[in-house]
Amino acid sequence: MNSTSIVFRVLRWIEGNAARLQGKGWTSLRHEVQAADRLFNLLGVNASDVSVIVEGGGNRGDYTARVVERFVNAEVHVFEPSKANVAKLRARFDDQSRVHVVPKGLGEEQATATLHADAQGSSLGSLLPRKLDHVGIELGMRESVELETLDAYWDDVLDRRDIDLLKLDIEGLEYAALSGGREMLEATTLVQFEFGGANIDSRHYFRDFHEYFTSRGFVLFRVTPFGPSRVSRYSERDEYFTATNYIAVRAS
């Protein structure tokens, strides 16, 4: 290995670690929940006052378990389209009356769709036929699933109540779910969402999310190892396509 190669390896290491310290390409369920709790506190909302949480993309329930533990009076409505994961969620939270498992995905409209995955219950499962051959992964498994919209569920099941926290980690369909929840969003305080590689497949940029939220009176924060960091304005540097978590907070 020549000296030039060594220099560039060091620079890539510095670049990657500098990004992760900013929360870019860095994820932690513990820090996600802590960041939401901290932002609630800034709004004058105690953890015990949080009453309704909607989660899109429950997978096996690790995030669900953390919010149930932290927000002790909240009912949590968890959307998950994978039949294998629905069974795991129901078994895991069978003794938790506050957890409501909804065996559907979220989308812009009510419809039937195809879930693509590399294995049953995979965290990579997506309603997008993602192209991941560059990392040696093929989403060859197919499963027919039902899609719900946030607005329909909010109207039919949640009785149009205020939503304290909406969490979206649905492998590239976050923007579509938001488009199907414009009315519910008006009654939502915090929206936590993931942005990353799946957005290459969905063709949605961070700019789309920034414009969507700021035009509706929200302020954006990035979840970092040091807590939530405000994204005061849009920058092309935020187009970082490795899993990064954001929280949009209603400014009022």
Image (spheres, rainbow, N blue to C red):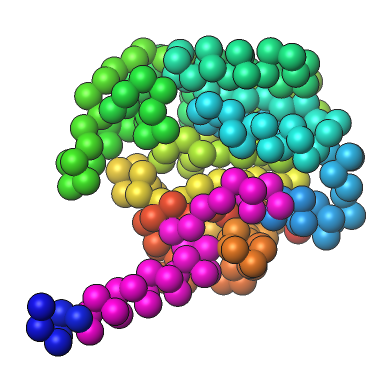
- Image: magenta residue range: 7-34
178 lies above or below 217: above
Magenta region's main secondary structure?
A: helix
**Is residue 25 a member of the stretch shown in magenta?**
yes
Pinpoint residue 24: horizontal percent, then vertical percent: 47, 63
Q: Nearer the viewer, residue 248 or 69?
A: 69
Pinpoint residue 209: horizontal percent, then vertical percent: 51, 53
**Which residue is depicted at the point 36% across and 13% down?**
144
**Which residue is depicted at the point 27% across and 37% down?**
130
| Residue positioned most to the front | 1
Image quadrant in which the C terminus is located = bottom right
170 lies above or below 212: above
Q: How many marks?
A: 0
Q: Going by the image, does 41 lie left or right of 130?
A: right
Q: Going by the image, does 243 lie left or right of 149?
A: left
Q: Going by the image, does 116 lie left or right of 221?
A: left
Observer able to see residue 148: no
Pinpoint residue 108: horizontal percent, then vertical percent: 49, 30
Observer able to see residue 198: yes
**Is residue 55 a member of the stretch shown in magenta?**
no
**Which residue is depicted at the point 37% across and 77% down?**
14
Q: Nearer the viewer, residue 175 or 229?
A: 229
Q: Nearer the viewer, residue 120 or 110?
A: 120
Image quadrant in which the N terminus is located = bottom left
77 lies above or below 248: above
